[in-house]
Image (cartoon, rainbow, N blue to C red):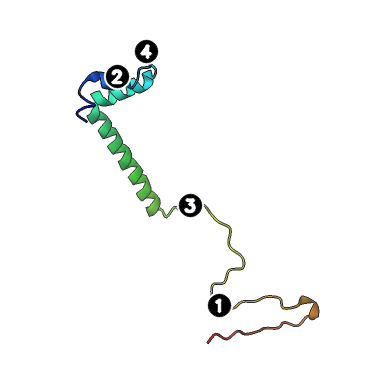
Amino acid sequence: MKKNQATPQNFINKFLDDQGLMKDAAGYHRSLSIAMNPDKFAKYFYEQGMADATDDVTRKIKNINMSERKAPEVGTTSGGMQVKAVNPDSGRNLKIRSIKRV
């Protein structure tokens, strides 16, 4: 860090091309602005984080589910009675088979 801050030219060289012309003026001005007003930007980012946290708490309080909805799964077993057609061509009688678990 001491080596990088030894001369202001190290900071400026990031934004100059090989001929010494400005290649990233927007980046230079943004970096310079943040360097000259660190408290202002720290306050801005702190307030932004607080606003995001407040939004998250508000969603939880209102019980808003922001996740994607998924279609219900068919064919999964959740323990309980299962019904399936044994042989639908054999007649109109309903056959119930019990599987006893030991």
Q: Secondary structure at mark 4?
A: loop
* Residue 95 in the figure: left or right of residue 76: right
Tell me, yes or no, whether the two marked residues, 2 and 3, touch with CB atoms within 8 Å.
Answer: no
Q: Residues within 10 Å of mark 4 (few under 14, many from 20)?
A: few
Q: Secondary structure at mark 3?
A: loop
In the picture, residue 13 is in which quadrant?
A: top left
In the image, which is nearer the foreground, mark 1 or mark 4?
4
Mark before the other along the chain sequence, 2 or 1: 2
Residue at left offset 36%, top offset 23%: 27
Q: Secondary structure at mark 1?
A: loop
Amino acid type, label 2:
Ile
Q: What is the C-alpha distance between the residues marked 2 and 1?
A: 71 Å
The residue to which callout 1 is attached is 80
Residue at left offset 39%, top offset 17%: 23
In the image, which is nearer the foreground, mark 2 or mark 3?
2
Tell me, yes or no, whether the two marked residues, 3 and 1, touch with CB atoms within 8 Å.
Answer: no
Image position, residue 51 (x, y; %): 33, 41
Q: Residues within 10 Å of mark 3 (few under 14, many from 20)?
A: few
In the image, which is nearer the foreground, mark 4 or mark 3?
4
Amino acid type, label 1:
Gly
Q: Nearer the viewer, residue 48 or 29?
A: 29
Q: Secondary structure at mark 2?
A: helix
Q: Nearer the viewer, residue 28 or 2?
A: 2
Q: Nearer the viewer, residue 74 or 1?
A: 1
The residue to which callout 4 is attached is 21
The residue to which callout 2 is attached is 12
Mark before the other along the chain sequence, 3 or 1: 3
The residue to which callout 3 is attached is 67
In the picture, residue 7 is in which quadrant?
A: top left
Mark before the other along the chain sequence, 2 or 3: 2
Mark before the other along the chain sequence, 1 or 4: 4
